[in-house]
C-alpha cells in the first residue's frame, strides 16, 4: 500500500522547489503526495522565517496538525509522523522541540536530502525524534535524484542558495547559510530533465540569484548572464526567468543577456527596499537610490519593454518622514508593474533588531497604507495598459471554471481565458480584454 505524504509550503519559491524535491526523495519509499493532511502518514510543514507573522503561523498550524494526529490514532488508522522543515526549523529547531514535543522530525533547508533516512528512523521502534539543522560541507544537490519528471509547464530550478550580503534586517544568511552556486553543467542537466518532463518555462532561483558564480565546463566561474546564454541553447525551453536578484550584482553580461536572449522574459524582480540613502546604508544594502536608478535605466535601455517588480520595507529603524518620502519619490519615478511592501519586522539574531530607534507600529501602518496605495495604482495602471494588446501567454493550468485556462503573460500576470485543456503548455497570442489588480482576462487571438 502506498503511504501518504502531505507537505504544506510557506514563504518563497525556493521552498516550493524544495518541497518538490522532498516529494521526489520520498517516492522510492512508497510515499504518494496528497492534498490534505487528514489521513496523511507523514505531514511536513516547509516553513518561512522571513517575518514574525510567517513564523507564528507555524506554531498555530502545528496545533491543528496535532489534533489530526490524535484523531487518526483514535480511529485506529495508524501513526502520523510530523516534520518541520525549512527556515523556521533551521532558526528555531530547539524551540520547536520545546513548544511542540509531538513533532518527530526537525530539519533545515540544507539537510532534507537525508529525509529518507530521517523518516525511516522516525518510523522505527522507540523513535524519539530526529533533529538535523546542520550545514553539511557536501552540497545537498549532489545527493538529490537526477530525474525530475512532472514539474509542470512552468518550473523552478535552484541555481544558487544562501547569502553572504548580511542586510541588517534579514534572517536568510542564518537560515539558508553561506552562498553556494551549483556547477553550471549540473544546472543545464537538470534543466534538460525538467524540459523533457514538459516544462516550457524555467525560473532560476537563488536568494541572491545574480551573484551566481558556478563553475563552468571551461573551469571558469560563470556568472548568471553566461548561464542564461547557455540555457537559451536548450531546445524546447521557451521562457527563462530568474529571481531574486540584488542591484549590486547586476553586471554587464546580465544586462547583455536581457538585450540578446529572446527567451529571457522582459520582467525583473529587483528589490530596492528603500529610496533613502541613509536607510539603505543602515540596511547594509551597499547601493544608493541613484545606483538603483542607473541600473534600471541601463536595463531599460537594453530591453525597452522591461517591466519591474520590487520589494519595499517601511519603518526600518531610524526611518523618518523624509526617508519615507524618498521611498515614495523613487517608487513614483521608477513606476513598478508590481511591488511587495512590508512593515519592518525585527528578527531575532539580526543587527537591526537591536537598534534603539525602532519605529512605532502605528507609523509603520500609516506608511504602509500610503505606499501600498501608490504601488496599487501603478499595478492597476500597468495591467490596464495591457488592454487591447495581444500578449503571448503560456497556458499553464485549468482555471476555476469549466473550459477556462490560466496562463502567464511575459510580465508574469495571470491571464484567464477560454481554451481546451489539451492546449496546456502552448504559448498563444491572447488579446487582453480586461484587467484587475492581480490578473488579466483575454481571448485567444485569431
Ligand atoms: N522585515 C520586513 N520585511 C523583510 N523582508 C526581509 N526581511 C524582512 C524583515 N525583517 C522583506 C524584504 C525582502 C522580502 C523577501 O522580504 O523586502 O526583499
Ligand atoms: Fe522565507 Fe527567506 Fe527562508 Fe524563503 S529563504 S523560506 S523567504 S526565510
Image (cartoon, rainbow, N blue to C red):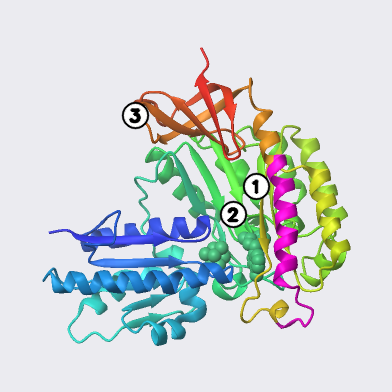
- Within the image, what quadrant is residue 25 found in? bottom left
Toward the viewer: 98 or 182?
A: 98
* Residue in view at x 58 percent, y 26 percent: 434
Residue picked out by circle 2: 216
Local secondary structure at mark 1: helix
- Mark 2 / mark 3, whichever is N-terminal: 2
The answer to whether any part of residue 354 appears in the image is: yes
Do residues under tags 2 and 1 come within 8 Å of each other at their CB atoms?
A: yes
* Residue in view at x 39 percent, y 72 percent: 84
Query: Residue 419's x, y, as percent?
Result: 40, 23
In the visual, does 118 lie left or right of 213?
Answer: left
In the visual, does 7 lie left or right of 218?
Answer: left
Q: How many marks?
A: 3
- Mark 2 / mark 1, whichever is N-terminal: 2
The answer to whether any part of residue 136 appears in the image is: no
- Within the image, what quadrant is residue 315 found in? bottom right
Q: Which residues are magenta?
A: 354-378
Residue picked out by circle 1: 226
* Ligand 2: quadrant of the figure: bottom right
Q: The N terminus is located in which quarter?
A: bottom left
In the visual, does 359 lie left or right of 116?
Answer: right
From the viewer's perspective, is the residue at label 1 or at label 3 nearer?
Answer: 3
Query: Residue 116's x, y, as percent?
Result: 29, 69
Task: Give the numbered dot on residue 402.
Answer: 3
Query: Quick check: is the Cβ at mark 2 less than 8 Å away from ligand 2?
Result: no
Q: Is residue 47 above or below residue 152?
A: below
Q: Main secondary structure of the magenta part?
A: helix
Query: Quick check: is the Cβ at mark 3 less than 8 Å away from ligand 2?
Result: no
- Within the image, what quadrant is residue 132 found in? bottom left
Amino acid at each position: 500500500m502506498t503511504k501518504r505524504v502531505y507537505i504544506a509550503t510557506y514563504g518563497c519559491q525556493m521552498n516550493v522547489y524544495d518541497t518538490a524535491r522532498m516529494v521526489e526523495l520520498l517516492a522510492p519509499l512508497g510515499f504518494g503526495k496528497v492534498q490534505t493532511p487528514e489521513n496523511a502518514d507523514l505531514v511536513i510543514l516547509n516553513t518561512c522565517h522571513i517575518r514574525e507573522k510567517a513564523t507564528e503561523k507555524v506554531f498555530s498550524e502545528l496545533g491543528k496538525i496535532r489534533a489530526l494526529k490524535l484523531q487518526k490514532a483514535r480511529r485506529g488508522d495508524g501513526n502520523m509522523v510530523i516534520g518541520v522543515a525549512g527556515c523556521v526549523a533551521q532558526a528555531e529547531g530547539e524551540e520547536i522541540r520545546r513548544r511542540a514535543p509531538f513533532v518527530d522530525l526537525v530539519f533545515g533547508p540544507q539537510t532534507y536530502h537525508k529525509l529518507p533516512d530521517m523518516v525511516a528512523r522516525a518510523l522505527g521502534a522507540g523513535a524519539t525524534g530526529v533533529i538535523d539543522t546542520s550545514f553539511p560541507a557536501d552540497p545537498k544537490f549532489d545527493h538529490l535524484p537526477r530525474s525530475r519528471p512532472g514539474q509542470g509547464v512552468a518550473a523552478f530550478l535552484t541555481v544558487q542558495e544562501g547569502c553572504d550580503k548580511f542586510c541588517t534586517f534579514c534572517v536568510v544568511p542564518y537560515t539558508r547559510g553561506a552562498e553556494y552556486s551549483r556547477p553550471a553543467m549540473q544546472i543545464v542537466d537538470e534543466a534538460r530533465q525538467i524540459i523533457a518532463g514538459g516544462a516550457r518555462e524555467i525560473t532560476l532561483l537563488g536568494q541572491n540569484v545574480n551573484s551566481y558564480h558556478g563553475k563552468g565546463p571551461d573551469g571558469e566561474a560563470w556568472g548568471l548572464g553566461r548561464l542564461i546564454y547557455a540555457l537559451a541553447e536548450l531546445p524546447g525551453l521557451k521562457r527563462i526567468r530568474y529571481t531574486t536578484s540584488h542591484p549590486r550584482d547586476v553586471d554587464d553580461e546580465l544586462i547583455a543577456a536581457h538585450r540578446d536572449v529572446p527567451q529571457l522574459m522582459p520582467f525583473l524582480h529587483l528589490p530596492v527596499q528603500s529610496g533613502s540613502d541613509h536607510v539603505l546604508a543602515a540596511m547594509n544594502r551597499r547601493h544608493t537610490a541613484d545606483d538603483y536608478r542607473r541600473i534600471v535605466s541601463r536595463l531599460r535601455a537594453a530591453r525597452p519593454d522591461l517591466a519591474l517588480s520590487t520589494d519595499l520595507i517601511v519603518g526600518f529603524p531610524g526611518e523618518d518622514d523624509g526617508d519615507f518620502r524618498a521611498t515614495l519619490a523613487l517608487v513614483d519615478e521608477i513606476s513598478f508593474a508590481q511591488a511587495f511592501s512590508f512593515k519592518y519586522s525585527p528578527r531575532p539574531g539580526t543587527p537591526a533588531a537591536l537598534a534603539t530607534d525602532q519605529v512605532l507600529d502605528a507609523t509603520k501602518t500609516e506608511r504602509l497604507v500610503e505606499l501600498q496605495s501608490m504601488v496599487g495604482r501603478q499595478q492597476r495602471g500597468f495591467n490596464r495598459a495591457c488592454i487591447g494588446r495581444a500578449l503571448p501567454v503560456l497556458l499553464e493550468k485549468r482555471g476555476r471554471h469549466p473550459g477556462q485556462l490560466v496562463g502567464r503573460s511575459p510580465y508574469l500576470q495571470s491571464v484567464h481565458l477560454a481554451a481546451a485543456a489539451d492546449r496546456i503548455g502552448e504559448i498563444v497570442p491572447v488579446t487582453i480584454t480586461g484587467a484587475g489588480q492581480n490578473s488579466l482576462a483575454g481571448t485567444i487571438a485569431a
